[in-house]
Image (cartoon, rainbow, N blue to C red):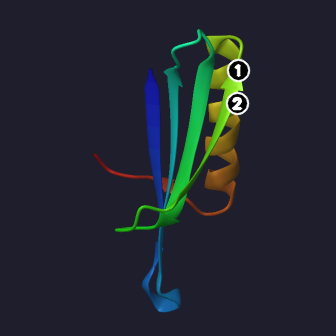
Amino acid sequence: MSCQLLHRIDPELNMARFYRVEVSPDLLGEIIVECRWGRIGGRGQYRLASYPSTLSAEQAASNLVRAKERRGYSIAPT
């Protein structure tokens, strides 16, 4: 469905972080929002949340992306 990758890089602080939000269906008919975060180059950690509809999952993912942008993350170039 959709995937958004964000980076926060600050060489002075030795900071190179990523945050990825992906919306996809599962086998049981639910819509899953997967958030993965960590240091660029590593596997990072992840969290899954299920939603009953695509609209609610997309809205939750959009809220997460906006929150990360307020914290200094920017959308990664493709």
The x and y percentages for residue 40 are: 40, 67
- Cα–Cα gap, marks 1 and 2: 9 Å
Disc on res. 60: 2
> Is 36 positioned to the left or the right of 71 in the image?
left
Residue furthest bottom in the image: 12
Report the front residue among 12 and 27: 27
Q: Position of residue 49 (x, y in %)?
A: 68, 33
Q: Position of residue 39 (x, y in %)?
A: 46, 70
Q: Earlier in the sequence, mark 1 or mark 2?
A: 1
Residue 48 quadrant: top right
In this rendering, the answer to whether 17 lies above or below 23 is below
Q: Amino acid at mark 1?
A: Tyr
Secondary structure, mark 2, is helix
Residue that appears at 61% across and 43% down:
65
Specify whether 56 is left or right of 19. Answer: right
Secondary element type, mark 1: strand
Residue that label 1 marks: 51
Above or below: residue 30 compared with residue 62: above
Which residue lies at the image location 60% right of the left edge and 32% below the top edge?
33
The part of the image, by quadrant, that contains residue 30 is top right
Q: Nearer the viewer, residue 17 or 69?
A: 17
CB atoms at circles 1 and 2 under 8 Å apart? Answer: yes
Please identify, in this view, whether the residue under mark 1 or under mark 2 is nearer the observer: 1
Query: Vertical placement of 12 versus 44: above or below?
Result: below
Name the image quarter holding the C terminus: top left
- What amino acid type is highlighted by mark number 2? Ala
Give the left or right position of residue 51, taking residue 11 as reference: right
On-image quarter of the N terminus: top left
Q: Residue at x 56, y 38 (%)?
A: 34
